[in-house]
Amino acid sequence: MHSNGDKAEQAKSNGDLHKAPVEAAKDGGKLIVLTAPLTETIDHAGYFIQMGMASMPIWMEGVLNRKYPKWRDVEVNDDGSARYMPAGTRVLEASLQREFNADDIAACLPDDLHKFVGPNTRVVAVSTHNPLGVTFAAGVYTSIFGSSKMPINSHYARLMFKQIKENPYRDSFKVIVGGSGGWQIIQTDLYDELGVDCVVEGRSESLDTLELFRKAIRGEALPREIEVKHPTTREGILFPDKRTTFGVVEMTTGCGRRCQFCLPDLNPQIDLPKDQILKAVRANVREGNKQISLATEDMFIWGQVHTDTPFYFPNREALLDLYSDIVTTPGVEQHVLSHSTMAPAVVDPLLIEKLSGILLPKSPIHLPYLSSHPQKKSLTPLIGLETGSVAMAKKIMPSKGVPFSIEDWPSVVIQGLTVLNANNWFPAMTLIVGNPDETDEDVMATLDLIYEVERRGLFAFFIPSIFTPLHDTRMEMKTGVTETMQLTPLQWQLIMKCWKMNLRPGQYSWWAPTAWRVGAIALWMYKLRKLNGPNFKWPLLMFSSAMSEKMMGRMGKIYTGKPIKVKSRKELIAGLKPHYWQYLREDNGDLPEGYAQQSRQSAHKASLALPVLS
Ligand code: B12
Ligand code: SF4
């Protein structure tokens, strides 16, 4: 095993492909070669580097290079294949190995393609998460920064496609693209420019995916786009026996809350077997990974899918057991949370407290200004806030807060965040700006909620993004704001207020201050005022703290928010439908009036139903 960092990557990453020493593929190359963009494969600098690369334009790459001079140093195996690859590529590899010989398949980084692609190659399969940067959050920030709208990740994805297109054997193989970002190629119709033959939407385990590869190997024409089925059972999901980027191991698929804009929610709700998860964790450790992250839309549904209890009442014991076995697996030194929802923190605060005891010691994230943990550790799951407007929430995500009513969404957010912060969880919360039909009142309601968070001294990293109608979702045909120029003063204020608040713990979210504080006003004078229009001016001045918010409010330049009525946890619980009471945990307290009587009656009924022993 060695690192490929010191070679001619710098030259190649600048698009200068011909300066790299070219070794021919051994024995005519592999039948199937798998690859993924370099920027989606790296994992040695933590999650945030990839998120930063998705949002920062290519002209800001120097900022990253200074912060992480070695970010390109990816480890490769002795034969030149990749030591780690994004989980999607690894599952694809496992899926193909059901049909094809492992020796006929190689997974490598784009710069090493020439070592594996030869006259025998019939398929180059690409897995990509976000190749063109036209998704939530990623698009908006690059367009705010202007001139080159190309995010760093997109630059590297395009470079990979160029490397494949210019391969001397290009005529003898097909290029098949898959992964959660494949739809971006379909939607922008960049097939020819990128040299892509076919985009697969859906999972590699599908038999239709295998048939597609067979067709390509036979040299038959492929459809431009194909939708393949998602497995519907736990057994249908495969687990790779190799190392993945960030040690990503799947935990669940689907979600169940049915938000209208959401793509993963369209997948079947499945929680994956613990023994398989642990096997994949051990495979990562065996291959040198020290970090693990369980991929999920909502970690709290695991252990409660298709049971007698609704999935939004977490299975405390199952979750504690799973996470404790993961973090105590020998060799696991770091564990990072992926996605979750907010309501479970209100439903079961004790679960959060107990999980913190298990997970904090292995968290690599330190927030010295915020955390009360002795080593200042914290947990930062990604949680969707999306809007603070109940009217908008009813339209786009009526079940986001179940078991609580969506009418109580702002209270669920505040109470949930209170529980999380008390246990050193400081989530990254996404917001959607410019939803279809969004009114000034909707934006003001979201600002009210953000100001309430600030007033209560709570903390989350708020990540606003502009509404993107994701292909295949229930909002696919809707349009919201399409250019930053169209943003209203209030929408701009919301975006800039969120970032101003994010900067409070300062240098510890390195990419936010770097990206946003670098001469905010100078940048505005130089180019942003033309690009983003007059509505940007006062929000930017507010962001840069050029004048106090109070003063700007008095001048009528910004909206300073109004206090909102927040229900306590007890009040939220009291508002639950009585048939949900049976799922409450008594040790969390705040039980509704009449609870004791109801549970006595259920216990009595249960005892009558017991068989009589003689
Ligand atoms: C872990 C994760 C991350 C991690 C690590 C990513 C990595 N490189 O490994 C981090 C935190 C860095 C990350 C960042 C981002 N992410 Co992310 N992430 C995820 C998450 C939770 C799991 C991804 C995963 O590994 N799943 C498991 C694997 C097995 O699934 P998979 O990749 O989809 O692969 C399957 C199929 O797609 C298919 N397949 C995959 N490749 C191929 C190739 C071929 C040829 C074929 C036939 C099939 C195929 O088969 C596989 C299974 O069999 C997903 C949500 C989810 N549950 O999928 C979001 C998700 C993919 N991310 C998302 C987003 C928006 C982002 C960001 C843009 C967020 C941001 N603003 O910063 C960035 C972009 C990063 C970048 N490099 O540009 C969105 C995708 C939206 C989209 N593209 O349309 C998702 C769906 C989350 C969401 N609910 O919105 N992410
Ligand atoms: S809670 Fe998140 S994952 Fe679930 S449906 Fe809504 S947006 Fe999708």
Image (spheres, rainbow, N blue to C red):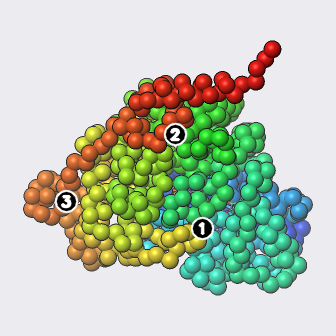
x and y, in percent, of residue 555 in the image: 9, 62
Q: For the residues labelled 2 and 3, say whether their Cβ atoms are less than 8 Å apart.
A: no
Q: CA distance from mark 3 to mark 1?
A: 37 Å
- Do we see residue 545 in this rendering? no
Gap in Å between the C-alphas at discs 2 and 3?
Answer: 39 Å
How many labels sit on residues?
A: 3
Q: Is residue 227 left or right of residue 100?
A: left
Q: Quadrant of ligand 1?
A: bottom right
- Residue nearest the viewer, comparing 497 with 44: 497
Residue at position x 42%, y 37% from top? 573
Asked if disc 3 and disc 1 are in contact, CB closer than 8 Å, the reply is no
Mark 2 residue crowding within 10 angstroms, few (<14) / some (14–19) / many (20+): few
Mark with earlier residue (3, 1)? 1
Q: Foreground: 209 or 155? A: 209
In the structure shown, which secondary structural element does the residue marked by tag 2 occupy? helix
393 relative to 270 in the view: left or right = left
Does residue 377 sit above or below 17 in this rendering?
above
Nearest to N terminus: mark 2 or mark 3: 3
Give the image location of residue 102, x and y in percent.
87, 58
Which residue corresponds to mark 1?
181
Q: Is residue 554 above or below residue 57?
A: above
Is the C-beta of the residue carrying label 3 under 8 Å from the nearest atom of ligand 1? no
Q: Nearer the viewer, residue 86 or 16?
A: 86
Q: Return the x and y of residue 260 as percentages of the image width and height.
A: 50, 64
- Mark 1 Cβ and ligand 1 under 8 Å apart: yes
Q: Amino acid at mark 3?
A: Tyr
Checking the image for residue 559, the label placed there is: 3
Which type of secondary structure does the marked residue at label 1 adopt? Answer: loop
Q: Nearer the viewer, mark 2 or mark 3?
A: 2
Q: Give the residue number, with chain letter if any, for mark 2.
A: 580
